[in-house]
Structures are given as C-alpha cells and as structure tokens.
Amino acid sequence: MQFTEQHQQIRNTVRQFVEKEINPHVDKWEADG
C-alpha cells in the first residue's frame, strides 16, 4: 500500500501519541488487569 503525505502525517501523529500517552502506562494496565 502506498501512503500519501497526509497518511504519513496521520501515522506519525498517532505513533507519537501512543509513545507519549499510552506506552508509559501499559505495564501498569496489564498488572491491574
């Protein structure tokens, strides 16, 4: 699949959000069930 520049920007934005807002909490969420 070929992504347009807009697709790439969205992917980058989502990746940054996940890395900043979700990944730091995954271990606790897993431990909490």
Image (cartoon, rainbow, N blue to C red):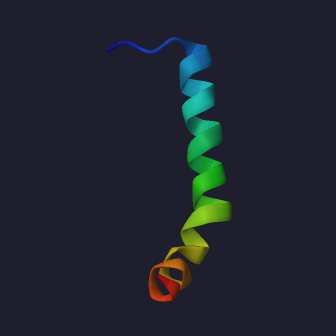
Instruction: Using the image as rendered, state which of residue 2 and residue 31 is in the foreground.
Output: 31
Q: Residue at x 52, y 11 (%)?
A: 4
- Image coordinates of residue 7 in percent, x first then y, are 55, 20
Q: Where the N terminus falls, by quadrant? A: top left
Q: Is residue 2 left or right of residue 16?
A: left
Instruction: Using the image as rendered, state which of residue 1 and residue 26 is in the foreground.
Output: 26
- Image coordinates of residue 16 in percent, x first then y, are 63, 50
In which quadrant of the rendered view does residue 14 lie? top right
In which quadrant of the rendered view does residue 11 lie? top right
Q: Residue at x 62, y 27 (%)?
A: 9
In which quadrant of the rendered view does residue 10 lie? top right
Counting the numbered discs, the total is 0
In the image, residue 6 sits, relative to residue 20, either above or below, namely above
Q: Residue at x 55, y 67 (%)?
A: 23
Instruction: Using the image as rendered, state which of residue 26 and residue 32 is in the foreground.
Output: 32
Residue furthest to the left: 1
In the image, residue 8 sits, relative to residue 23, either above or below, namely above
- Image coordinates of residue 12 in percent, x first then y, are 58, 37
In the image, residue 12 sits, relative to residue 26, either above or below, namely above
Residue furthest to the front: 33
Q: Is residue 10 left or right of residue 32?
A: right
